[in-house]
Image (spheres, rainbow, N blue to C red):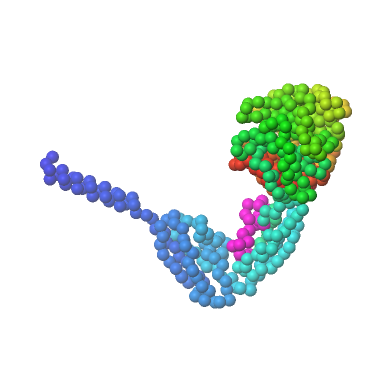
Amino acid sequence: MNKKVFFRYLAMATLFFMVAIVSSCKKELCSVTFISDDNIVFQFEVLKGSKLSAPVIQPNQYYDKEHIFGGWFTDREFNNIWNFATNLVEKNITLYAKWVKKDVMFTVTFIDDGNVFDTISVVYGSKLPDSYMNITKEGYTFFGWFTDINFYYIWDFTNGIVTEDVKLYSRWKWGMRKVDFIGDGRYGAVGFSIGNKGYIGTGFCDSYYCVQDFWEYDPAANRWTQKANFAGGDREYAVGFSIANKGYIGTGSNRTTGNAYCDFWEYDPVSNTWTKKADFEGGYRYCAVGFSIDNKGYIGTGEGSSDFWEYDPATNKWTQKANFAGVNRWGAVGFSIENKGYIGSGYNGNYLNDFWEYDPVSNTWTKKTNFAGENRIWAVGFSIGNKGYIGPGNNDYYVDDLSYFWEYDPVSNSWTKKADFAGGFRYYAVGFSIGNKGYIGTGNNWSAYVNDFWELIP
């Protein structure tokens, strides 16, 4: 091939390649038409897939001054409003201006717990009074007004305007936030109450070490006070409960040292001192369950265990009782209601939801109605009056149910779902009751070791 022919073909190939590039870069255009009162007020083309900027339009330009502009809609019946923040132009479109007379009134109905809380009439385009955000209910935290009963879409009192009749639904979550726990955020701590005071201590902190600090909460003053450190040393996953006017902490582990423990200690709040008691005779363990009935304490289950033991502070002795009747487990919850003990949930290779009652008089276990929430580990359990409560916890899958509390009634042997917990999802938190109120704090919410503290009123 001679040079002239070669360069002729090269030129043709280059031209074809450039035409292909230009063709591939050509973008599709879409026509956009804005119509107000049957008049075209704006018309232009935009690239397909573009967002639009809302044009400025005044009532005296295309309509009389007695009307308020109500937005641009994709249909003449004004059913589908164009969202300039999110909608993209994918084809030729026509948008229609909606005008509403200034004296047009709409009804806003506020619905609280299924009942009409208030009904007001407002002018089209008005904002709602933010005073409706200041409502309160004992024992609950208000999370806003929603336009749907499933609480997906919250009403924006800052920017939202009324363009039609509206029903708004209140959302409450169970719990009122108290002063935060002063110690470091942590999980795997222990907690119990003595008289009218609550206590939290030990655990694994957000600085990634186990601790032995110990704190007292006074609900009357809503104040935390640091007390004498737990004398058994740093640990997590221990057991804590109270008998009469003394507190007790025992067992647990320390991931830093690799140690597990079977020691058992008594706390005297009057002298603010710790006294070592007889070691737990069930041996070294962690993630066990503990509670008290009358003047005796009980510890059972834990890593690979189903044995169950009774502690008598009068004799400082441990006595083995009937083994827990469910499968071996760890990370369960335990509490007592009057003269019976209860153990449920936990993990043994599978997340569990079975629930058992212990009778110390007959030394027997009786299976009760399964816990009605999601199977879980590391939940919080405590009793208030003659009811038991289980809430948050973990099962490796975040589901809404894991932020709810459930109430157990031993008389009817049934579970009732309470409102969503205001403090949100967490696991291995601390829970106890003082009088007729429950308390929950600390824990791990998958993103942080928290130190918030909440009061629960049944």
Asked whether the viewer can see residue 130, the reply is yes
Residue 118, horizontal then vertical, whole percent: 73, 63
Q: Nearer the viewer, residue 306 or 51?
A: 306
Frontmost residue, 455 versus 62: 455
Q: Is residue 117 left or right of residue 450?
A: right
Classify residue 349 as left or right of residue 435.
left
Query: Looking at the picture, how far across and down is residue 413, in whole percent?
Result: 81, 37
Q: Residue at x 63, y 40 (%)?
A: 449
Classify residue 45 by image quadrant: bottom left
Q: Residue at position x 16%, y 45% from top?
A: 7
* Segment tinted magenta in the rendering: 145-164
Residue 291 location in percent, x, y?
Answer: 79, 33
Task: Give me the residue at 76% from left, 24% from top.
Answer: 279
Majority SS type along the magenta span: loop
Vertical order, 137 against 95 (above or below) = above
* Relative image position of residue 282 (x, y in whole percent): 75, 23
Could you tell me which residue is drawn at 67 percent across and 32 percent down? 234
Q: Tell me if residue 148 is in the magenta stretch.
A: yes
Quarter of the image where one finds residue 199: top right
